[in-house]
Image (cartoon, rainbow, N blue to C red):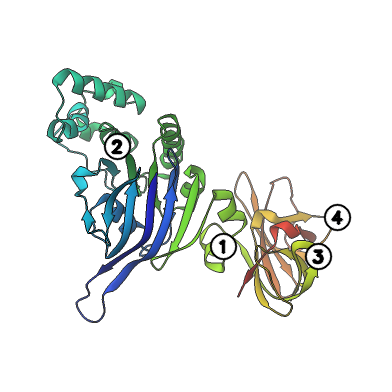
Amino acid sequence: MLSVRALCTEYPAAHGPSVKAVREVSFEVPQGNLFTLLGPSGCGKTTTLRSIAGLEKPTSGEIAVGGRVVYSSDRKVFVAPNRRNFGMVFQSYAIWPHMTVFENVAFPLEVGGRKAGRTQIREKVERVLAAVALEEFIDREATRLSGGQQQRLALARALVMEPQLLLLDEPMSNLDAKLRERMRFELKRLQRELRLTTVYVTHDQAEALALSHAIAVMNEGRIVQVGTPREIYERPCNRFVADFVGATNFVAGTVAGTDGEEGHYRVGTDLGELRAWSGETLAAREQVTLSVRPEDVELSEARPEGANVREGLVEAKVFLGDSVHFQVKVGGRTLLASVHPSLRTPIGNPIFLRIDPEKCVAIRG
């Protein structure tokens, strides 16, 4: 439904060469899917979103929605933002403080190119406020809403125009942690019930994993990996993705050889030889980095069966309610493990750890 092809966006610099904010970015978003652009500040994700919206004019590339080209450098096409029929929610919400909830949502219908009658406007506003559970606040001043309600109001204002594409730029960054978690469920419900094709920008890995059908991880203006949330988290393609999306343990190693099954290797490390998985074909003596998520480091006081078993000492631990984080010293290295609170091994005691070879991901370099 949304197709972005070889998109490049540059900004002129006061001194020296221009700044290349977006470099050869390409992706597709199927109808009804939520696609997230994830990455650190300055990686180009917001510039990509604003280029799709028409708020930035790219240097080159092509953007099409539903087969309709809204930007093409080759064809000299640039459709103005107000003619693209896209809804956008900004980080600041941009709520009109002097208007009521009804007036905020009705505003796009009253000033748009396809002006509707009063009855039709009322019906549309009431329908979209019901969808975001704000119908009882229809006559309230917008400034008297809570942060979460203002976020939903901004969403309602974007939805009332029945946009072909919904663009969300870090819409939950101003909410506190608990409200942000609740709003994730609300947004996911709305997006799936209304089958809104959505592009979502965030630097919050948990948000991206919770909401998305697919994620594009960006760094330095480029997309470095595209995949489902599970693929991005469990099968990172490089060290940057593994490090940025969640916590992980890194162990440097050298490939000793294959391990019988396709994609499985024996890797020499300072923890001894470990069995690992890789999505790439690796050669003997190639340098790799093993990435192991803390929840995939299994701990037990009795020696377990299977591969990748090591003995260590509990160096430190932190109780987090639903889990306990253990720091386990194995030889000269400390590994982080996240386990169930039922494990209560004291600090200084010996403990065994096991890493499933499928969860031990070998990354080049």
Q: Quick one: SS at disc 4?
A: loop
Quarter of the view holding residue 326: bottom right
Residue placed under numbered mark 3 in the picture: 311
First reached walking from the N terminus: tag 1 or tag 2: 2
Residue 68 lies, in percent from the top left, at: 30, 45
Whether residue 143 sits left or right of residue 299 in the image: it is: left
Residue 252 lies, in percent from the top left, at: 66, 74
What's the amino acid at mark 3?
Answer: Glu
Residue placed under numbered mark 4 in the picture: 302
Residue 128 lies, in percent from the top left, at: 30, 26
First reached walking from the N terminus: tag 1 or tag 4: 1
First reached walking from the N terminus: tag 2 or tag 4: 2
Q: Which is more foreground, mark 2 or mark 4?
A: 2
Mark 2 and mark 4: Cα distance apart in space: 58 Å
Residue at x 48%, y 52% (from the top left corner): 215
Q: Quick one: SS at disc 3?
A: strand
Residue placed under numbered mark 1 in the picture: 242
What's the amino acid at mark 4?
Answer: Ala
Count residues near mark 4 (Cα–Cα under 10 Å), then give few for <14, some for 14-19, many for 20+: few
Q: Note whether residue 173 is visible.
A: yes
Mark 1 and mark 3: Cα distance apart in space: 25 Å
Residue placed under numbered mark 2 in the picture: 163
Cβ atoms under marks 3 and 4 closer than 8 Å? no
